[in-house]
Structures are given as C-alpha cells and as structure tokens.
Amino acid sequence: MTARRFAIGVDYGTNSCRTLIADADTGEEIATHVCPYPSGTLGILLDDRDPNLARQNPADYSHSFFSSVRKAVALAKKARGFSPDLVAGIGVDTTGSTPIPVDKQGTPLAAMKEFRDDPAAQAWLWKDHTSHAEAAEITEKARQHPDKYLTKCGMTYSSEWYWSKLLHCRRTSPKVFEAAWSWVEMADFIPAWLTGNPDPAALARCVCAAGHKAMYHEDWGGLPSREFLASLDPALAELRDRYRAPALTADKAVGKLAPEIARKVGLPAGIPVAAGAFDAHMGAVGAGIRPGVLVKILGTSTCDMMVAPAETKLPDIPGLCGIVPGSIVPGMYGLEAGQSAVGDIFAWFARHLCPPEHARGSDPQAGLTRAAAKLRPGQSGLLALDWNNGNRTILVDPLLTGLLLGQTLHTTAAEVYRALIEATAFGALTIIRRFEEYGVQVREVVNCGGIAEKNDLVMQIYADVCNRPMKVSRSAQTCALGAAIFGAVAGGAWPDVPAAQKKMTGLKPRAFQPDPGAARVYAELYALYRRLHDAFGTASGSGPMHDVMKRLIAIRDRERKGA
Amino acid sequence: MTARRFAIGVDYGTNSCRTLIADADTGEEIATHVCPYPSGTLGILLDDRDPNLARQNPADYSHSFFSSVRKAVALAKKARGFSPDLVAGIGVDTTGSTPIPVDKQGTPLAAMKEFRDDPAAQAWLWKDHTSHAEAAEITEKARQHPDKYLTKCGMTYSSEWYWSKLLHCRRTSPKVFEAAWSWVEMADFIPAWLTGNPDPAALARCVCAAGHKAMYHEDWGGLPSREFLASLDPALAELRDRYRAPALTADKAVGKLAPEIARKVGLPAGIPVAAGAFDAHMGAVGAGIRPGVLVKILGTSTCDMMVAPAETKLPDIPGLCGIVPGSIVPGMYGLEAGQSAVGDIFAWFARHLCPPEHARGSDPQAGLTRAAAKLRPGQSGLLALDWNNGNRTILVDPLLTGLLLGQTLHTTAAEVYRALIEATAFGALTIIRRFEEYGVQVREVVNCGGIAEKNDLVMQIYADVCNRPMKVSRSAQTCALGAAIFGAVAGGAWPDVPAAQKKMTGLKPRAFQPDPGAARVYAELYALYRRLHDAFGTASGSGPMHDVMKRLIAIRDRERKGA
C-alpha cells in the first residue's frame, strides 16, 4: 500500500479566506479553516458617498493565508495518515475581476505609506461598479472593432472587469495610475506571491482571468491590440506589454512554495503551487463539471458553468458571460453564464417585505420557506421577473428591474416569496435553453453553494420548473475542493483534471426529481414568463415595453440627484 | 325669525346604519348615531365554502333603524332649537344592488320560518359575487340586443347587479325563487317599509337602483323588454310586470312615516319620506356635486361621480358604470365611475407585506404613510398598476390583477406603499381624462370618505398626479347628509336639490394644491403607467399582453380547484 497523498485548496471569497486539506485520492476533506479579512466592513472597504465603490486591502490576503493555512495544517495533523510532507500541491482560487495596482517589483501600492489610505491603490473588488461609464465606452468601441472582442463575453463589457477599472483609475486617480507599473489580478497575484515571484512582467497570468475579464483570446493573439487599447487611452497600450503571454491554465504549476511562507504555515518549502483561477470556475471543477454537466453555484447570485471538448465547433453564444478555452477545465472550452441575483432577491424580500408573522425568530426566510412549501404551482396567480439586480444571462443588461404581476387583495407574503423563487427558476431554465439552443446539451445539472445545501424548496422548484433532476454536489465547499484538485494536478498527483475529479468529487445521495404535474403547470407559467421577459427585456420582443424599466431608472436617478 | 327646520338622513352602509339629524338651513350636524347590524360577521352573512357569497339579514335593517334613529333623536333633543315637530323630511340611502326576495305582501322571505336559514332568501348584498356566470351571460346577450342595453352601464353587466342575482337564484335555489313574488332593492324596500306600503307591485322603484343596476332607461321604455328577459329565463319576464314604472327620483316623497314606526323612534307620524337612492349617489349630493364638480368618495374602493344638465347632448361614455337621468341630482344626468380598490390595496399591503419596523403599533399604515411621505416623486423607480381587485373604470374588467415594476435589491416597503398610492392616483387621473375626452369637463374635484378625511399624503399625491387642487367635503358623513338633503327637499323645506345643497353642503378650508415640480415628474410616470395600462388592459393596447393576467387567473383557479 502506497502512502496517502493530500492537496491543499485555498479559496479567497468576498469576505474571507478558506483553506481545505483534502485526500488527493478520495476527495475526503481532512481539515478546513476560515479566516475573515480583518479590514473594512466584512473585509470590504466602502465609501458612504459612493455605493458603487468596493475595495479590499491586499494585506488582508497574506494575513488570511497565514492564519487559515496554518490552522488547517495544525488540524490536519490530528487526522490519521496526514503529514505536511504528503502535500502534493497547493491550488488557489479568488474572486475576480479583482485587479491590484503594483509597482515594478510587484508590491501592491497600498503597502506604501504614500498610498495606504487611497482607495484607488487598493484591490478593486469584483463587485466595484465605479467604472460603469468606462464599461459602456469600452463596449461601444469594442463592438465596432473588426476583431470582435466582445463575441466571447456576451457582447457587453462589464463595469466589474479589468480594463474598465484600469481606465476609471486612469481618469479619476491619475497619481495612483502613474505609480502603478502594472495591474495584477488577485488570481495571479496570490500564486506569484506564494512562490516568491511577484515581478509583474514575469508572473504568470491565468487564462481564467485573462479570458473572462481582460478580453484575452487566441483568435486575436492574446490581449486586444495596442491600437485598440490606445484608442481608449494611450497608457493602457503600454500596460499591454507588461502582461505575460500566453496565459496559463490552472493545472500548471507557477512555481514552488517559498521557504519564508512555508515556514510560517507549517509546511515544507517547495510544494508546487498551481496557477490561479476564479472561485466559481474552480468550484465547478470541485462539483464535478464535465461535458454535458451544468454546474450551478447558487448563492447571492449564480454562476452557471459548462465545459465543451476542445474539438467542439462552438458558435458564439449570445448572452454568455464568457467562452474561454481552458478557463475551467484545461483542454476544454469553459462556458460561463449566470443570474445577477438569486439568494439576494430572497434576502431582499425577507428584509423589506416580510410581515411580523414570518419575521419572528432569527431567520424570516425559514418561516417564509415553510409557508411557501405548502403552496402548489400556479395557485397564487402570481408571476415575477427575477431582475431586481438586472439580468446577466441571457440579456446582459444591468438596467433591468424586478416585476411582480397577478396580485389580488388576498395575495400573501408566502405567495410572493414563492413567486420570486419560481422567477429565479425560470431564469435558470432560460440559461439552460440558451446553452441547448446553441448545441451545448445539458444532460445533468449539479448544484452547489449555500442555497443548494440549505433550501430543499428552491431545489424542488428548480427541478419542477426545469423538468430535470437537480443533483447536489457532495462537497459543501466546492471552490476550495476545486482549488485542491488543481493543486493535486499541478503537483503531479494526477495526470489531468478529469482524472482527479473522478476520484475527488461526487454527489449527495439525494437528487431532487421533477414532479410531472408541477412540471406541466410550470411549462404554462414559463411561456408567460418568457413573454414578459421578451417584452420588457428585448428590443425585438413581442411587446414594445423594452424602454419602460430604463425610463424609470433614468427618472429615479435624476430625482435622487435632485434630492 | 322663522323656526328652525331639520332633516333626517338614514345611511345604510355595508356594516352599519347611521342616522344624522341636520339643520335644513345650514347643514349643521345636530346629532348622529350609528348602529352596527347584529347578524353575521360585521353584519354580513358569509359562507366558508364560497368566498363570493355575501348576504344580509333583512331584519337587521328595521332593528338598526329603530336603534339609531331613536338614539339620534334623543341626542338632538339636547341641542338648542331642535324638536321632533321641526323635522321636515326623512331621506334614506342604502348599498346596492342589494335585492331582497319578498312575498306578495312585501314581506322578506327571510322572515318566514321556512326560509329563515336559507342564504338565498336573505338580502343579496352588493358585494355578493356568486352570480358571475350569469353576469357574463347577460352581458353576452345584451351586447347583441338591438336596444343596446349596455350602453348606459359601461358595456358590461356586473355580477353585483340585480338581474344577475335573480337569475343565479332561479338556477341554484329554485324553491326560494318560486316563493318570491318579487325582488325589491333595499333602497326601495326601506322607504316602502317606513311608509307602511310594502306591496311590491305598488311600491316606488327609484331611478338610481333601476337605472344603474336593472338596465332601466327611457330610451327603451323602462326595464329591458319581456322578450329579452325571457331569453335569459321566462320567469324573469314575469317579474318585469311586478316592477312599478316610471321609477322615481329621490326628491319625491313616497309617503309619510307610519305611526307604528314613528312612535318607536320618538318622531311624529306623517313626516314625508323620500324615495331611496344608493349611498354613493346621496354622498355625492352631500359633498356638493353640481355640473363641473367631480365628487370622489374614497374608501376601500371609490365612486367617482359627476352630473350633467339634462339638456346636455351626452354621448355614451365607454367604461363608466352608469349614465342615468336623475340618479344623483333630479333633472340631471348622473354619471358614475369608480376604482375597484383603493383603500383596500393599502390595507392589503399593510396586512400582508409590511415589515415589523412599520407594523409596530395599532396602525401599520400610519408608519408606512410617515415613511412614504419622506420620499420624492419618481425617486423609488417603482411603478404599479392599481388592479388588485380588477378595474372598474375605464376597463370594466374584473379579471385584471396587480402589477409592480422597478424593484431592485434596495426597494423598501415605504417605497412600494407609495407606489401603490401613486397607482391609485394614476387610476383616478385616468377616470378624469375619460370624462373630459367625452366632453364632460372636470372643473373642480371634491373628495370625501375615510381616506379624504384621514390621509393627507394620499390627497397631496392625488393633487400632484392630477395636477389639480384636491378639495375635501366639509361633512365627514356626506352619505347621511345627502340623505338628509333629499329628506328636506321631499319634505318641502327646499324647492329642489341644488337649492338645498347651496345651504347645507360645503368644503373644508384646506385644499391640497398641486406642486408643479411633482406634477412634472408624475406626468412622465403617468405616460409609462398608461402604456402598462393599455398593454395589459386592452386588446388594442400598445403591446399584446392583454391575456397575461387572465391566463394566470385561469391557471390559478384550475390549480386551486385541483387542491
């Protein structure tokens, strides 16, 4: 019998860093530890005057690495068969696009006294939306460009993404922009730092961040052309040359764990460290993604991911957030879709519109869920659109808002709550249909994330609305498990990601099966949902209502400014 | 100096009977007393198995008359200058259409042992909706009839109305129908009973009930033809002959107060009793209605009433509930419109969707109103349709439901509550515009009813949305005051209703003036409201969404039956 092998996954979320130590042969989760980021509000630096601003202190990333890995290793040592010497590799996933301005040595500007308190010098967290004007400008220019840079990212460039943020900094914080020799995605920054190679011109850029957020694609030779970037701002063109190509997939090691870091966490130096990737993508791997399997990460919003073999003749699919070779599983196309708000909509309703009868106790959603579970499909007469935070896939339109229809004088809170769950399920089905319309068959759906773990009603409604079984990932921490899988592969424990997945991932025994009667009712309701969706969401829809929500937003923004 | 003169108004509402004794020269309100109906739930006989059923015990009507008039007279005696001998006349208003099945002597069947517990033998309260199938059948047949019976009632015959209820009884309770020699509207039954002339063939039928609820109109010689009624059911044709014509306006006395009733309430026998009319119509008179003045009675729903001089060449106005000569002010056309739910929508929201922060205390609407009053027009980004109970005017469609649009993840309960108030204001404006589109100019708006009395925010929003001053009636009990006015006229204290109104009605000193800035924003929002209204409410609207709400209702009803 050979010795056991282990892999470490480090998952950098929005508010905390989680370390997971897993058996590299079975996926068994030996130890885990979470360290919240110490700075700001739940780890986020906010600005009272600008609700769009969301930054992070890069020092939190090293602090939380040391704390969570050290404690996870200490815990693992108590498990039979574990020894730090048996760790084959380390993988890292992060949020993104979360670019960090760094100097020529790769040190974050935020670490310098001069910039310590300057928000522009911090990490620009994925959900920072200060750059919406720049995003619109980039979208406009990229649409007209012969290289069709937007075809791989759903035809709209987001304010959350790399170039929008850099351009906004250039325009609003020129001092920081001047001082930044380069901007490094958090997913690239952490592995580079762990391996002692922070030089921004030399460090590996991962395909995941490059392809999904920086318009990197082989079809046009990597990043967008110098000439295109210069048309946005000449300074961006210079940055292009400081971005190492080709970008790496996360099954490749970028180096070995540096001795001074290894010592602090109780690991031997020299453990291979994999290239980084985004949390959702590694989460999809940890949930067992493979061709034909849609992985849904269900949280405040969703990521809906698929992969397609490299030999597939894949069309551009309108509305997807991205189609990037190797971004999820190396050697396959990674396809990413998503819903802008799911859990966030339920939480909004529970926070703002839940009457005392359900609001009692610490979790109003539990009461609402119990009451909603007693209702039958269709019996409320309600129908909602799931656009309270805009629509990511398939409309790619942040200027859409919620809609609720069918209220009477007897409509109850539980009925509305259920209608909102159903609306997100209709949104989920719309994504499945979009994949299939473009030839990407969805043969299996695997759910993970907090909602999949905790809310059986949501899972059952998704099964009934989509008329397919809803399976749930065995691991409750698929992102960290996915990072461990990449660590294992980069460290040579497995020849490739699918081989590692076969052993290290799995499903919970219980799948949610569609009820045929419910599915029939939901098929009728979906037809009506789709009519509202097309009428309010598309210029070519069946009704000319496309501008209604936008006009209301314009009036709202004007009147709020006037206040 | 001549002696003072007084008039008594008796207002039969949905849950109680109110007596008001007023000075016939000044309108001063000397004494008032309210007696709740003793039977059922708040005076209404309900059926757990059928939410459409709403009946009343006719014995409650005499009981509450005796109780409230006796106590009001006793109170008035304490006022300087009052004496029962100085009462010039008595007027009565009631709900309607509230038909009562009676025997050949005019005794309600409900008074007989055999029928005492039979719901069909009781008074069929206006809001009884058991007859919706019959209403649809009558609408269908009347639409095809050459006499155009529906042109005076908005082209749709309601399940709340006389013939629908009779036909439903004929089909579902044949024993009661057989035993009923005639059916008498409550507005006719009370004056006939007070004057000791209950014979159903001889008692006066008032133009208000006849014209608004029984398709009575001089254009086709009174009630619909025997042949038309026979096409619904031969038994209805027979009832036509037991309905005295012509119908009377309420300024005419139907007789004198019978001695045995007078004795019980402390009044002299022989006081003239006016013909009856509906509460809203007498309320409009009590609020000072005259040509150019729209009177809005704002309660759970609204009645919006106007009058036009008899010499006006008045077109049929689509969507109005009725256009009836003399139904409000004798000698003028009475025009009636309305909104199916106003206060009911606010109460629904407060009951079902109000979070604990506002729900504290006895009146959640007070907290919601305070928070909503701090918001500016347009700043929530929300827009709603006021159709939670269908739409009475201008769409005349009970199969419409509510709609709320523009929600984000930050939308608050106070914002939604304000959007609902605004929606009812947009509905109010739609009615004003419909009057004016057909040549009936609205030069002044006078509001009355509970909401006008109590909710300044609603009144201000109505002023801003309609961009007109909102005035409020001086009297808080305009229905009872209107009944007293008719009593005064029928008793000879005044030659006609306008002369009595000039002295007996008035306005509160404070009118709500439109704010020009708010009016500009609301003009923009109304344009969007109107697009949703037309798209979802009309087959010819700007978008083909007309069937969406109806389909949801059909699915809802089917699924509830299946439960």
Image: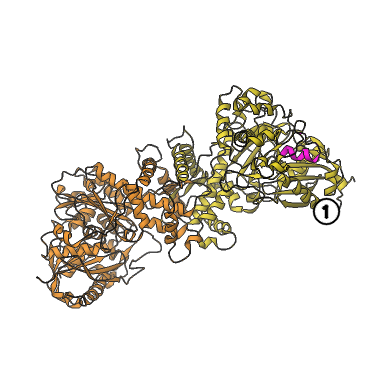
Chain colours: A yellow, B orange
Residue extent of the magenta highlight: A186-200
Q: Position of residue A32 (x, y in %)?
A: 76, 52
Can residue A441 be spotted in the picture? Answer: no
Q: Position of residue B337 (x, y in %)?
A: 27, 51
Q: Main secondary structure of the magenta part?
A: helix
Q: Position of residue A309 (x, y in %)?
A: 70, 31
| Pick the front one: A255 or A131 | A131
| Pick the front one: B417 or B116 | B417
Q: Circle 1 marks a residue in which chain?
A: A
Q: What's the residue type where badge 1 is placed? A: Ala
| Pick the front one: B217 or A358 | A358
Give the vertical position of B361 relative to A173 (above or below): below
Tell me, yes or no, whether the highlighted magenta stretch contains residue A302.
no
Give the vertical position of A35 relative to A172 (above or below): below
**For residue B366, which quarter of the picture?**
bottom left
Tell me, yes or no, whether the highlighted magenta stretch contains residue A191.
yes
Label 1 CA crowd tier, 10 Å (few <14, some 14–19, many 20+):
some
**For residue A75, which quarter of the picture?**
bottom right
User: Which residue corresponds to mark 1?
Assistant: A74
Q: Residue at x 55, y 63 (%)?
A: A360
Can residue A528 be spotted in the picture? Answer: yes
Q: Is residue B499 left or right of residue A474?
A: left
Task: Label 1: state its secondary structure.
Answer: helix
Residue farthest to the front? A114
Q: Position of residue A259 (x, y in %)?
A: 86, 43
